[in-house]
Image (cartoon, rainbow, N blue to C red):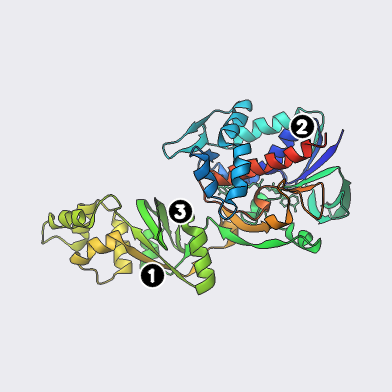
Amino acid sequence: MKKVVIIGGGPAGLFSAYLLLKKGFKVELYDHSSGFGKKFLVAGNGGLNLTHSEELSRFSQKYNPHEKFFSEMINEFTPEDLREFCTDLGVETFVGSSGRIFPKKLKAAEILISWLKALKENPHFSQHLGHHFNSLKEMAKVEFLVEEKTLEVEADFFIFAMGGASWGKTGSKGDWAPSFIKAGIKLAPFLPMNCGFERSWSEFFIKKIDYTALKNIALEFNGVKVRGEAMLTPFGIEGGGIYALSKAIRDEILEKGSSEISLDLKPDLSLREIEKKLGAQPAKASLSNIVRKALGFEAEVFILLKELYPNLKKEEVPQIVKGLKLSLKGIRPIDEAISTSGGVLFSEVTSSLELKERPGNYVIGEMLDFDAPTGGYLLQGCFSTAYRAVKSIGLHT
Ligand SMILES: Cc1cc2nc3c(=O)[nH]c(=O)nc-3n(C[C@H](O)[C@H](O)[C@H](O)COP(=O)(O)OP(=O)(O)OC[C@H]3O[C@@H](n4cnc5c(N)ncnc54)[C@H](O)[C@@H]3O)c2cc1C
């Protein structure tokens, strides 16, 4: 029986373990944490968005500039296949109104429990928690640190699935990178992706706003417009709509030191309709009352308008509501980001995700230098890359 050592027990590593056992390999799964799938569990906190139901050609565009490569991999292991995998584990899924796919109970725990049970039931599976990947040794060997002692492990194949570099408390710290660089493998530096941004608010604003959601808005940056929501926070702004634009905003801040986005607070109303609604309010009412009543805004939205336009006049409101300019000065720390760009460059691996300089050694999941917006694209990317690597290893049975 050929032995595969998988390092990293997130969704990518766990899925490759599941597939390899089905193919008749002996699988050893290593992780430095005290449990597997910690980031997967965190991802389930706000409703686990497993994947998306949109047409596959549109789906793969989300992995730009690796669209072509991901298109192949996602056609090979599709969102429907991912749903079937969940069904096999006894977990039902559903397509939400936005087209996004979730487990029925929305949480990750149910999936993880059945997944681990399926692995542990197989006599050819063994788990090794508390094993910190330390370095790449010769081609068929890696070194772990276990309770401060080194341990060398040999295998016929290795799958590296140690994730990106955000949410370090889940175990994904990107601390595998130095060893890969030392071995001559080229990496792109880690950068926050699907992240929040910083700007300075007044003390008054911070006190009044705390964490306020701007729902059903449109956000625009460099001609790209998305519908979604944003969260005003004491440090700046974050949330789904911001994450969707985060790569381009991030890159502009890195290049120029600041960036500016535009928010449409009433995307379903035209300028003319807003003017009409404002005009229908009693002329003697305060501007705050006029704006709030005419447009159905919470008090916090008017506070936002006054924060950005202290001398706001009634006639300026329609234009500002349709195109509120928000300057952003910084990127929130990488540890807070939903995901990271950077990691092992695609030029370092074959189309089977096997390291060109280390045959038999595969890299999958967020360890690879790909990024994608939220919406289930990250997890689908992890599953599809795991599938691709296992397909290649499977040729050697
Ligand atoms: C708050 C939040 C919400 C999210 N929501 C979603 C969502 O709804 N939909 C979606 O598609 N994606 C979501 N994601 C992203 C998704 O969780 C990740 O893309 C995914 O978990 C990456 O999987 P992975 O297997 O590549 O790596 P990880 O899940 O990061 O797992 C890597 C594993 O490797 C281990 N490891 C790391 N370094 C070492 C080492 N040196 N030695 C040994 N072990 C090591 C870690 O302990 C960890 O168990 C979310 C992420 C966050 C933080």
Q: Amino acid at mark 1?
A: Ser
Q: How far from the left and from the top, in percent, is residue 326? A: 38, 66
The residue at the point 80 percent across, 45 percent down is 158
Q: Which residue is mark 1?
A: 202
Numbered tag placed on residue 365 in the rendering: none
Q: Residue furthest left?
A: 283
**Foreground: disc 1 or disc 3:** 3
Q: How far from the left and from the top, in percent, is residue 118? A: 71, 29
Numbered tag placed on residue 239 in the rendering: 3
**Foreground: disc 3 or disc 2:** 2
Q: How far from the left and from the top, in percent, is residue 334? A: 59, 60
Q: Are marks 3 and 2 in contact (CB under 8 Å)?
A: no
Question: Mark 2 or mark 1, which is nearer the start of the sequence?
Answer: 2
Question: Mark 3 or mark 1, which is nearer the start of the sequence?
Answer: 1
The residue at the point 53 percent across, 40 percent down is 56
Decide if residue 10 is in sight here: no
The residue at the point 82 percent across, 49 percent down is 359
Name the side, left or right, on which 311 lies relative to 382.
left
Residue 292 falls in image quadrant: bottom left
Closer to the camera in the image, 45 or 322: 322
Q: Assess disc 1: are there few (<14), some (14-19) or many (≥20) residues with their C-alpha within 10 Å of its C-alpha.
A: few
The residue at the point 66 percent across, 62 percent down is 188
The span from disc 1 to disc 2 (Cα, nearest Å) is: 57 Å
The span from disc 1 to disc 3 (Cα, nearest Å) is: 21 Å
Question: Mark 2 or mark 3, which is nearer the start of the sequence?
Answer: 2
Name the side, left or right, on which 354 lies relative to 373.
right
Give the position of the N terminus as an image quadrant.
top right
Closer to the camera in the image, 152 or 290: 152
Above or below — where is 337 with respect to 121?
below
Q: Which residue is mark 2?
A: 21
Q: Amino acid at mark 3?
A: Gly
Q: How far from the left and from the top, in percent, is residue 349? A: 73, 53
